[in-house]
Image (spheres, rainbow, N blue to C red):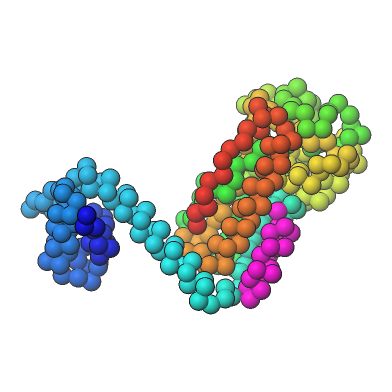
Amino acid sequence: MAEVALRQIRAIIAVCEEGSFTRAAARENATQSGISQHVAAAERTLGVKLFDRSAAGVTPTPAEQRYYKRCIEAVGQLANASEEVRGFAARVSGDLRIGLIPTLTRAALAPTLEQFVPRYPDVRLHIVEGYSGGLTDMVLADEIDFAVVPTFEGRVGLKSRLLVRDREMLVSSAKRGGMKPFEPVQLRDCGPLKIILPGRANVRRRNIEIYFQTHGVEVADIIEMDAMIGTLQFVLRSDWVAILSGLICIADIGRPERTISPIYDPPMIADFVVISPARRTLATQAQLFLEIFGAEIARIQAIWAQTIPPAVYPVRPRRASRT
């Protein structure tokens, strides 16, 4: 059976997106008759009409609408394959500037570097730890290639993709008492809380306060602190508590000093996204770093899934990485 040629597929995509053979020809640097011939040849091969033609232009048929989606996926896969193969022609090199929040540097960064550095020795790494607002400004100013931050409404000039959905944990000192390690808790039953919260410029602060208001969590006192090590150490030495992502709490498994309590009924969820400039695609070295980084985060989540009851921490299949 005859197959539709790639040049015909590109013509079909162009016509569908431009709504005109003339504009499609200009976009593809071809003649209008050439584009028409490619589309007609594809229709004969497929045995189906792809476009309705009229004086007003061309309109994709239902068959074309479905075929277009598949064509876009196929062309994208070809582009990705070409990029991967080019990696064999030369060693990956260049600068890679990364911004990460403290939640991710404590547990996931070192294992990622342990794999990435020897594998890609010609990549010059520059890693900045900061909070979401500052890192977002750095991405917009082109000071870093990408950053991983809590999800937010978005800003013009940025694109984002979900990296992970993580469960929030109540963190307290074992000396405080009243909590059993890894036993789920309902925050409304734990108050009034003396709690350390991130500052109001931090995206997570608003999410936590909304949860408190929605679910009747009583608060006795608040300390604002945008210092992760300071937060962890003060919790360890006092009867104050904090709400932290499971990603950063993974280091406390097997250590009795701090008690980690999954927030449950309902859970508190933290979404973390990769943000980068909208005007360009991430370089090969950035994509390779995120592939290893994402695998390490998935490993951490698998550990939590084995540590916490499945009803509280259901296992979710990891989505394929897209950049």
Residue 32 found in image quarter: bottom left
Task: Look at the image and tell me in which quarter the N terminus lies.
Answer: bottom left
Taking the image as shown, residue 51 lies to the left or right of residue 285, namely left
From this viewpoint, which residue is outermost toward the left? Answer: 55
Q: Position of residue 83 (x, y in %)?
A: 46, 67
Q: Position of residue 147 (x, y in %)?
A: 60, 58
In the rendered view, tell whether residue 90 sits above or below residue 269: below
138 inside magenta stretch = no
In this view of the protein, can residue 175 be seen by the observer?
Answer: yes
Q: Identify the residue shown where x is 81% and y is 43%.
A: 252
Magenta stretch in the rendered image = 108-132
Taking the image as shown, residue 262 lies to the left or right of residue 281, namely right
119 inside magenta stretch = yes
In this view of the protein, can residue 152 be seen by the observer?
Answer: no
In the rendered view, tell whether residue 4 sits above or below residue 307: below
Q: Position of residue 16 (x, y in %)?
A: 23, 54
Residue 117 found in image quarter: bottom right
Q: Nearer the viewer, residue 179 or 189?
A: 179
Q: Identify the residue shown where x is 19% and y is 51%.
A: 46
Q: Identify the residue shown where x is 16% and y is 49%.
A: 47
Q: Position of residue 155 (x, y in %)?
A: 50, 53
In the rendered view, tell whether residue 308 sits above or below residue 160: above
Q: Nearer the viewer, residue 269 or 214?
A: 269
Task: Give the number of marks.
Answer: 0
Q: Identify the residue shown where x is 64% and y is 41%.
A: 166
Taking the image as shown, residue 106 lies to the left or right of residue 288, namely right
